[in-house]
Image (spheres, grey):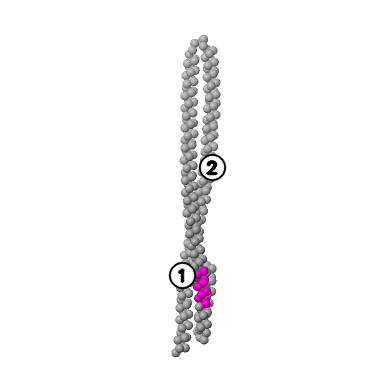
Amino acid sequence: MNGIKLILPCIFGIVCIVSSCATLGTQDTKLVDQLKAENRVCSQNLNLFMRENDVLKAENAKYKKENATLQSRNNLLQSDLNALQTKYKNDIAMWNERYDTLQQKYDVFVKQSDDKIKELSQLNKLLEQKMADEIARLNEVIRKQEVDFIKEKESIVNQNTKKEMEYQATVDSLQKQVAALSSEKEQLKTRLTEAEILIQKLQKELEEIKKSAVTETKKVESQTSEPKKEESK
């Protein structure tokens, strides 16, 4: 846009000089020199305008490269998220399997203890004291193992809960990063679109300025050549 602001005064000056040619027939040479000087200034401004256009193209390429980098990071984060989710599912399955195994062992132990108690209850009365002691001992073992089982079960549940919370926190964090990258990607897309629109607009204005400059130059040359022909006659 700065290039256009520099070129417009040049064109305006050329038009003003051309409009006054009719009354300045004796100053044709000076007018042609002034027009050539104005034309050189316009050419310089056109060059400046084209350099600015090149800068905008470079920025456009930069934005495209940044967009590709963000897309790659987004894919990497999505892959990490999928891997964490798979690991979380596998760990939960492992802890559930351990829990089921312990439950089965407990059920078998309880059944075996009941059978043992029934067997001891059928012994001779002479062995009643011994049987009572054995029952008491077995009951104590069962009680301790039940306590240990409950503690282990609670530990597993707590560990599962803790792991689930940790994995969920990690998943939430990754999802936020993915959302942030997606937002940044959309912003870059918007800026890229705006830059492309601006480049197209500038290219169109450049073509119009070139056409206008050529037309005005031809017009001035035509008007300056007519007085010379009349003088030669």
Answer above or below: position of 201 versus 170: below
The part of the chain drawn in magenta is 37-49
Element on which disc 2 rests: helix
Element on which disc 1 rests: helix
Viewer-proximal residue among 32 and 156? 32
The tag on residue 134 is none
**Badge nearest the viewer, 1 or 2:** 1
Residue lying farthest top? 126
- Mark 2 crowd level (few <14, some 14–19, many ≥20, 10 Å Cα): few
Mark 1: which amino acid?
Glu
In the rendered image, residue 155, in percent from the top left (x then y), is placed at 54, 32
- Mark 1 crowd level (few <14, some 14–19, many ≥20, 10 Å Cα): few
**Is the magenta region chiefly helix, strand or loop?**
helix
- Contact between marks 1 and 2 (CB within 8 A): the answer is no
Quarter occupied by the C terminus: bottom left
Viewer-proximal residue among 90 and 179? 90
In the rendered image, residue 157, in percent from the top left (x then y), is placed at 52, 33
Marks 1 and 2, how far apart at CA:
57 Å
Q: Residue at x 49, y 50 (%)?
A: 73
Viewer-proximal residue among 217 and 125? 217
Q: Residue at x 54, y 37 (%)?
A: 162
In the rendered image, residue 154, in percent from the top left (x then y), is placed at 54, 31
Residue position marked by numbered label 2 in the rendering: 169
Whether residue 23 can be seen here: no
Residue position marked by numbered label 1 in the rendering: 207
Mark 2: which amino acid?
Ala
